[in-house]
Image (cartoon, rainbow, N blue to C red):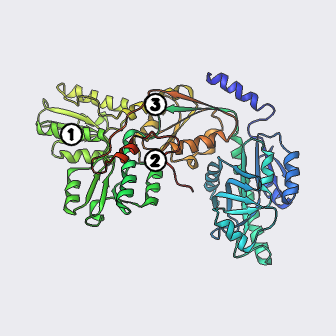
Amino acid sequence: MTPASAETTLDRLSVGRKPGELLVLAPLRIEARAVRRGLAPGAQVIPTGVGPRHSLAAASTHGARAAVAVSGFCGAVDPTLAPGDLVVATEIRGPGGVIPCPSARVLASALRRRRLRVRVGPIVSTDRLVRGSERRRLRATGALAVDTESAWLAGAADGRPLAVVRAVVDHPAQELRRPLALVNGTGRGYWALRQAAGVLSEWASTVRPRTIMLAAPRASCAGVERAIDVVELALARFSPPVYVRRQIVHNAHVVSDLERRGAVFVDEIDEIPDGSTVVFSAHGVAPAVRRAAGAKRLNVIDATCPLVSKVHGEARRFAEAGYTIVLVGHEGHDEVEGTVGEAPDHIHLVSDQGEVQGLEVEDPQRVAYLTQTTLAVDDAKQVVDALRERFPRLAGPPSSDICYATQNRQDAIKLLARECDFVLVVGSANSSNSRRLVEVAERHGTPARLIEDESAIELHWLARAPRIGLTAGASAPESVVRRVLAALTALGPADVVERRAAQESRRFKLPPEIRSPNASATARAPAGPGRRTAPRE
């Protein structure tokens, strides 16, 4: 299906509903008044009445809008919440089951940008007021707040985009039955709902039919999968703490997940107690780091990506042959530090073609180049071409140093850029290959943004983007991509298509320090959509 035909199909799913049309259901008139004062013109606000019976009646009566928001007061079951705090529901738990709200973190981030205090998590709907020990019981389930309407009012959405935003008016230590709590909590809750209303209008403005194009390949590569496997297996075999020098891969979700399991991330070897187990990251280390680990009698497990190890070997060979080595890469990157450390007296680092002319070498006839594995392919070629023009006898590696996964993901994003209005790249800010994907998309004429996860999406990016591209850097988990996709598809009818640039089946063996029959099976296991779990907020 072409993007044009897909959009036509999606338009038919929303007949009679204009983008941005918003219905807000608020149980109390004071709640409705607070919300109405902050909404953009055209939104409809209905005071529904309190409790399940009135909520069911309202849900069956009102509808026919593009988006539905439930807004009102709530009671906190989490004692860290205070009156005036907003709770954006990731899910509503009621007698009829669980109703998910996948765009909750997108909305919550927009509220935080207005300097509002916001928490994201489950809200429980009950058929009566909850006090004392009942609140403590609900807190033990992971819930943040409780109300008596949201689960029933959510039925008005009937499959359309749904948001639930509640303002805390009391908490376990100060319930509303106390007069002071009633005045204080209601006043702060009213103000918070009024401030939140404008963001609800902005959220509704993003609701529209759209096509979402997934790049393939995307997300974790074989080297990243292997590195994470190494830490997981080390934790299982040696028990926590297992130390990891630097981030095992450049992704905050992966690092946080492993920290919760017992991994301890350090910057340098001298932070690790003598005799401990340490894992070297996928980016590799310099020989000096290995010597420091040996001096402390550390049990070393080397998770260096084999493709990075290839570059290290090339650096040693060129240095031993008397070449001056020009390393194309980014200063300060962990991989570059490791490569330079292999032959520090022989390597000059350049980051772009403008730095080539200033190079001073001992013998222009014996110059070789190497590249960081995560560079933009086109950028690296420009620098190498400039080197070859200045040093006609330039030597190089027998095959490209740029990682196959880096190249495949850049090729895939070029496909997206031809068809999309906007591209989202999932990855951490310190991920070189993820940042390069943003640059490649923009170089091909399509605006792009790097996001850690769905909470980093800004609503105004989506309002005028009927075709959105989605990809992820080689260090980002597919599970986070799926969360972003769920948030996008929760903002109106969506047709999800894939644009594939290459097939990937490569797997790397585990390092010998951790290898075993069972461990090898783990390393070869394909990375399904949920294999890498991201931490809950």
Q: Amino acid at mark 1?
A: Gly
Q: Secondary structure at mark 3?
A: helix
Decide which of tag 1 and tag 2 comes sooner along the chain: 1
**Mark in the foreground, 3 or 1:** 1
In this orientation, which residue lies closer to the viewer: 269 or 262?
A: 262
79 shown above or below 518: below
Task: Give the alpha-carbon distance from disc 3 to disc 1, as whole Å.
Answer: 33 Å
Residue behind mark 2: 428
**In which quadrant will I find the N terminus?**
top right
Q: Which residue is mark 1?
A: 313
Q: Residue at x 30, y 60 (%)?
A: 277
Q: Earlier in the sequence, mark 2 or mark 3?
A: 2
Residue 96 placement (x, y as % from top left): 77, 52
Residue 165 % position (x, y): 72, 55
Q: Is residue 224 visible?
A: no
From the viewer's perspective, is the residue at label 1 or at label 2 nearer? 1
- Say what amino acid the circle numbered 2 marks: Ser
- Local SS, label 1: helix
- Above or below, 213 against 431 in this view is above
Q: CA distance from mark 2 to mark 3?
A: 20 Å
Q: Point out the tag, 3 or 1, that comes first from the N-terminus.
A: 1
Using the image, tell me which numbered label, if any, was put on residue 443: 3
Quarter location, residue 12: top right
Q: Name the residue at the front extreme.
A: 517
Describe the element under mark 2 as helix, strand or loop: loop
Spatial CA span between label 1 and label 2: 28 Å
Q: Are marks 3 and 1 in contact (CB under 8 Å)?
A: no
Which residue shows up at 33% across the image and 34% down it? Answer: 402
Q: 120 and 508: which one is in front?
A: 508
